[in-house]
Image (tube, coloured by chain):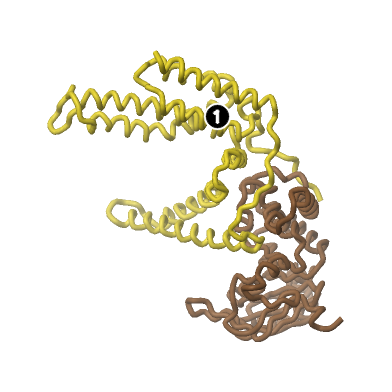
Chain colours: A brown, B yellow
Amino acid sequence: MSSIQSTAVLLEGVRFTYPDGVEALRGVDCRVGIGERVALVGPNGSGKSTLLRLLTGLLTPAAGRVAVMGRPVIRENLVDIRRTIGYVFQDPDDQLFSSTVLDDVAFGPLHLGLDTAEVLTRVRRALEMVGLSRYERRVPQRLSAGEKSLVALATVLSYSPDVLALDEPSAALDPRHRRRVMGVLAGVGGTQLIATHDLDLAWELCGRTVLLSEGRIVADGPTRSLLSDSATLERHGLELPLLLQGGARAG
Amino acid sequence: MHDKPLTLAFPPQGFLERTDPRLKVLCLLVWVVCVVTSPMEQWPLPVAYAAVLLVLLAGNVRLMGRFIRRFGSALPFIFAVVLLLPFFKEGEAVWRWGPLTVTREGGHVARQVGATACLCVGAVALVWASTSEAGLLRGLRGIRLPAGFVAVFGFMLRYLHVLRPELHRLTDARAARTIGGSGPGPLRSLANVVGTLFLRAHDRAGHVADAMALRGFDGRWRTLGDHHWHAVEVVGGIGFIVVVIAVRWLLGRC
């Protein structure tokens, strides 16, 4: 398999500036292979969410090239790109806009043009994957924060995207639901990009970590070695994962 | 992994709650048309309509609290209109006080409007009290309202539950930072709360639009097909419509 064929996500010299003049990305080069699970870590405002939004075509880079599964992310390709990538917002209330869980999880497959029977099969499978198979008739506003996060995941799993882009999937979750979300992500497989401040999640789930700071990639490598490097982490406003902090203190 | 058993906020009980929302919305439409076109000055008509509503309520006593809350929230608006109408309609004066004049025709119109509004709002409150939000949307789709309109109504219902706690947080934060008192200060901070809430709602609307676009929305609404009609419900609905039309036709001629 050639390098391009095995590439799920490609960013070359990507720059992005918001209308208020904030330069969010200042020349990012990154390649994510098919099936890789990569953590995007960095302090607030480092450009993690912006990078994910560029992949989905919600934002357009000022310079550089973005491609997902071999297709450039440009206006003409957006329909195909959005079938390929599933983006999960940080706040599940942004993702869950329908009156029932069933309608929300069915929204993606329905708008892919699938017939009702296939849509219902996919909805049931997606809810089963997140462990909420009996939640079809529930209303989103009556779910707990953890349940909302799991349903938000199901809304993208239902159309089986090749790439999952997750923005802070464990934010504001209690330990039990955080563990459930991690279990689902571990079980799903496929290419995943996880923007997170939860370095323990990155440690457990991701083989590779990309450290962003001030719109640039400052480190990129195996999670276990990058997240053990306290000097690099501290230089960019981060700390060792909690599970290493005990060891560091004892050491 | 374990999940909680299915628990709905209001598990449907009683025939009105179990009735297909599409049928309820259809019956409501017929009701409104009959009531609005009825000559309310003939007292048996509004009394008969009110009796139909009361019979429905009596058969679904569990809904009483919810019905009263919803109906009660609309009453001040109805009263405001009914109280003002006699002063603005031209005609034979029956009472004068300075520049204010109450006319006989005004009183007549006020009675007509008051009765019509109470009966229509009462029926809406009954349907609303006996139907879940998802059911209401299904009912509106069922009577073939434009999908975009139903979706906007759905967003409104869905995000009221998100914006209300946000409003509470903002007002709490405002209360924690203001001492109270009179003058423009508290008003200004209240205006700030309203402005902030608007901006947050606008911001969220942008995120929701993004979430829809990312899941393939191209401006055309697609929804799951509705369930089939149940014969018993259809017969019951037709029976209700026949009763309402009969009341309108028979008593409206007297």
User: In this rendering, is residue A237 above or below B216?
Assistant: below
Badge 1: how crowded within 10 Å, few (<14), some, or many (20+)? Answer: some
Is B48 left or right of A233, judged from the image as shown? left
User: In this rendering, is residue A82 above or below B94?
Assistant: below
Say which quadrant the C terminus of chain B sits in.
top left
Residue ID for mark 1:
B27
Residue B221 percent across, percent down from the top left: 61, 53
Q: Determine the residue located farthest toward the left in the rendered image.
A: B98
User: In this rendering, is residue A106 above or below B242?
Assistant: below
Is B139 left or right of B41, judged from the image as shown? right
Q: Which corner quadrant of the image does residue B60 belong to?
A: top right
SS at badge 1: helix
Residue A156 percent across, percent down from the top left: 71, 60
The count of marks equals 1
Write the residue at 51% across / 32% down: B29
Residue B26 percent across, percent down from the top left: 56, 32
| Amino acid type of the residue that numbered disc 1 sits on in the rendered structure | Cys
